[in-house]
Amino acid sequence: MLNLYDMCTEIEKWLIDVRRDIHMTPELGLEEFVTKRKIIKYLDEIGIDYNMYTEHTGITAFINLNKEKTVAIRADIDALPISEDLNLPYSSVNYGKMHACGHDAHTSILLGTCKILYNLREELDVNVKFFFQPAEETIGGAKLMIKDGCMDNPHADCIFGLHVDPRLEIGTLELKYNTLNASTDTVDITVTGDGCHAAYPHLGTDAIVIAANVITSLQTISSRNVDPLDSIALSLGIINGGIKENIVCDKVNIRGTLRTLNEEVRALSKKRIVEIAKYSSKSLGGNAYINIEKGYPVLKNSNNVINYVKKNATELIGHDRIMMRESGCLGAEDFSYYLERCEGAFYHIGCKNKLKNIDSPLHSSTFNIDEDCLKYGVMIHVINVLNFTKE
């Protein structure tokens, strides 16, 4: 077998330089214009073919060998609206924007995978597609990529994706059978009453009082409507209402997210949100108007592909460095859209190193990675492609 560790170690400095280059210029979803130019520059250096899209900032690189099977690998390329609080030579130059979720690492790992597999293209038994996807943190850029045909011509038979994880030590891999990530829906509730002078509240209907009752009552969904063994998070993050301290409020807007790990609980929770908001408001003399905007679906891994990744990773890093996650997490991930189209697996690689004081959580202003994780990510991607038709 090829010594993948040595091959990835040979390009490690290049991987780190690429990651730092991308880290310096973070851009928000669908604004990744500089990032796109940088990715194209590296793809041109590698010599690999690629397609650009006109409606968004995504790119698909590919090695099309007219083989029977096609494997896809995805990396997200967008950043977050967070001000970086790290004094690094390659810290963000875009104030208020930061790669605080590791998408710079995902992108450089995928570019490294392009580099290795393109050099090994004579040994491949599959076609390979590489998705550089925008807007994972916002609108779900996976939908845009799929709409523009990234999964077709040739059709992707299997897809892989990874996420760096600061909970996990460097050199480790975390896998999960079945459901890994939650669905997420946006909940918007407008409560209405009748305004009046605050000195005569009996002449009106206070929308703030109604909204307070609605918010409190909605918490009974998780405690009284859903099986305690199932997971649900209904988080109401915005409440707006009122125009002056001496006027009884006539309208309040409440906005938040609903996260669940299966479709039955998702449907039940939506039904109860509507019922509770509507009838709680009516019982207090007001009305409620509810809109629930469908978000990302549940991310459900293909168990046979998880077993496949586990076998490959064991060969690379050893059984003791692989952890099997028992429960799903309520964070959302738009990789789920790809898994609606073909089988595949999404997994986590460790990027924490306490000896280097690298252990800040994702989406924090001090998030960083041990850059050794880059070569591990490349190794996992490469072996998954190389062994795909040998099973």
Image (tube, rainbow, N blue to C red):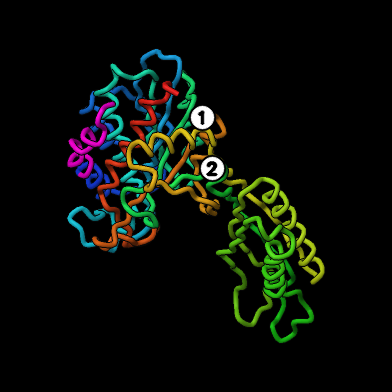
Find out whether residue 53 is within the magenta segment.
no
Position of 70 relative to 192 (above/below): above
Q: Nearer the viewer, residue 370 or 310?
A: 310
Coordinates of residue 62 in the picture (x, y in percent)? 35, 23
Coordinates of residue 68 in the picture (x, y in percent)? 45, 14
Position of 289 relative to 301 (above/below): below
Residue at horizontal 42 percent and vertical 29 percent from the top: 72
Q: Name the residue under label 1.
A: 147
Q: Can residue 120 be seen in this view?
A: yes
Q: Which stretch is magenta?
A: 1-16
Q: Which of marks 1 and 2 is in front?
A: 2
Q: Nearer the viewer, residue 67 or 85?
A: 67
Position of 239 relative to 384 (above/below): below
Sort mark 1 into few (<14), some (14-19) or many (20+) by Cα contacts within 10 Å.
few
Residue at horizontal 65 percent and vertical 55 percent from the top: 230
Which numbered marker is on residue 254?
none
Residue 361, quarter of the rendered image? bottom left
Total residue callouts: 2
**Kind of residue sitting beneath label 1:** Lys
Q: Which residue in the rendered view is the most extreme toward the top? A: 66
Mark 1 and mark 2: Cα distance apart in space: 28 Å
Q: Do the residues labelled 1 and 2 touch (CB within 8 Å)?
A: no
Coordinates of residue 326 in the picture (x, y in percent)? 53, 51
Residue 91, quarter of the rendered image? bottom left
